[in-house]
Amino acid sequence: MFLVTYNFGDMPVNHMTFLRHRIFLVPVEEGVDGKGEASPGGGLLDRKKILCYLIHLRFQSSKSGKIYLHNDIRLLFSRKSIEVDTGIPYELKSFTEVPRNPKYSPRV
């Protein structure tokens, strides 16, 4: 199940935008000492996050200002195994991004 929160209340009439939500499997930062460095043998810098899921949604506003899910929904499910048997604890973290400049584009 995906839970993607968004707020496009400031979207102007007849404009569109998108939202991209990514869920990564990232290592838990255990073994980091008070100096912010990895403990010997910890290899914190060697660990990489693994993309598990991605959802791409497009939104547009109508002439009346209502916001609709527009066009298609794109989903990506990673083919890599989510189970990591390295003994290093991992957790799921989600990140949501929207365009910054310009945040909304006029519909043509």
Image (cartoon, rainbow, N blue to C red):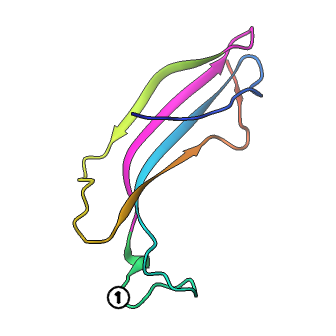
* Residue 66: x %, y % from top left: 69, 13
Q: Main secondary structure of the magenta part?
A: strand
Q: Is residue 19 left or right of residue 104?
A: left
Q: Is residue 101 magenta?
A: no
Residue that badge 1 annotates: 41
Q: Which residue is drawn at 45% across and 36% down?
A: 55
Q: In this view, does 68 lie to the left or right of 50?
A: right
Residue 58, quarter of picture: top right
Q: In this view, does 18 lie above or below 91?
A: above
Q: Is residue 64 left or right of residue 71?
A: right
Image quarter in which the C terminus is found: top right
Q: In this view, does 30 lie above or below 78?
A: below
Neighbour tally class for label 1: few under 14, some 14-19, many 20 plus, Cα within 10 Å: few
* Residue 62: x %, y % from top left: 69, 12
Residue 72, quarter of picture: top left
Q: Nearer the viewer, residue 103 or 21?
A: 21
Residue 45, quarter of picture: bottom left
Q: In this view, does 69 lie above or below 7?
A: above
Q: Residue at x 30, y 46 (%)?
A: 78
Q: Which residue lies furthest to the top in this view?
A: 64
* Residue 102: x %, y % from top left: 73, 38
Q: Which residue is drawn at 24% across and 71% down?
A: 86
* Residue 76: x %, y % from top left: 36, 39
Secondary structure category for the residue under label 1 = loop
Residue segment shown in magenta: 48-66
Q: Residue at x 47, y 46 (%)?
A: 22
Query: What is the three-letter code of the residue carrying label 1?
Result: Gly
